[in-house]
Image: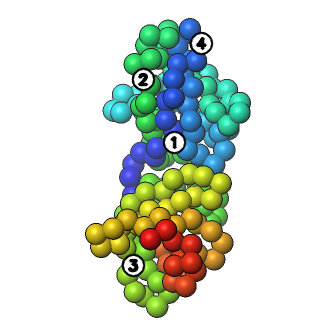
Amino acid sequence: MTDKLNVGEVLKPQGIRGELKVKPFTDDAEAFHAFSRVFLGDTPYKVLSVRTGGGMVFLGLKGVADRNAAELLRGQQIYVPREDAPEPAEGRYYIADLLGCTLVAQDGEELGTLTDVRQAATDIYTVRMGEREVMFPAAEGVITAVDVAGGRLTVDKKRFYEVAVL
């Protein structure tokens, strides 16, 4: 498990006072109200203001006083220390904890390693299977069990091959 969680990406400056428009990677943009500090790279920033709208987050950070300073942060990933992040609801997991897990069929056959999760209406998982990458949606009935501590995602093999993009 990682000690920092990626919670968003700076899209662009918002206005002239250094506010940042952020694409959240959290289930709910309102989760940003719980963060008192964030990291952009290895640099910590105190959170001065948070507002949300249209599924986006608008952050004011100490030390980012104007549009020019905000522009330098465009494209940066936003992290929070794990201890500052809320516990995920039952049956929900942080993406950082899933990456690197082994994808296995219910019969125990190892299928590959999870390398990426893209957020969408239904998350899209990417698995390295030998020399190729296979994508599949986290549709109902595909993933049957998650063992973060054991580093395993169990899938219904038949359902997996029905929805996977090979």
User: Spatial distance from mark 4 to mark 1, Cα to Cα?
Assistant: 22 Å
Mark carried by residue 73: 2
Is residue 149 something one can see in this rendering?
no
In the rendered image, the residue lying farthest to the front is 166
Q: Mark 2 vs mark 4: which is more N-terminal? A: 4
In the rendered image, the residue lying farthest to the bottom is 107
Residue 9: percent from the left, percent from the top? Answer: 49, 35
User: Could you say which is closer to the camera, residue 141 or residue 41?
Assistant: 141
Residue 64: percent from the left, percent from the top? Answer: 47, 15
The N terminus - image quarter: bottom left
Q: Looking at the image, is mark 3 or mark 1 nearer the viewer? A: 3
User: Spatial distance from mark 4 to mark 3, Cα to Cα?
Assistant: 48 Å
Give the residue type that dot 2 points to: Leu
- Residue that label 4 marks: 15
Q: Mark 2 vs mark 3: which is more N-terminal? A: 2
Query: Up-down: is 120 above or below 43?
Result: below
Q: Secondary structure at mark 3?
A: strand
- Residue that label 1 marks: 7
User: Could you say which is closer to the camera, residue 136 or residue 115?
Assistant: 136
Residue 35: percent from the left, percent from the top? Answer: 56, 35
- Residue that label 3 marks: 111
Neighbour tally class for label 2: few under 14, some 14-19, many 20 plus, Cα within 10 Å: some
Location of residue 115 (image quadrant): bottom left
Q: Secondary structure at mark 4?
A: loop
At a point 43% along the width and 80% down the height, the residue shown is 104
Would you say the residues marked 4 and 3 are in contact, meaning their CB atoms lie under 8 Å apart? no
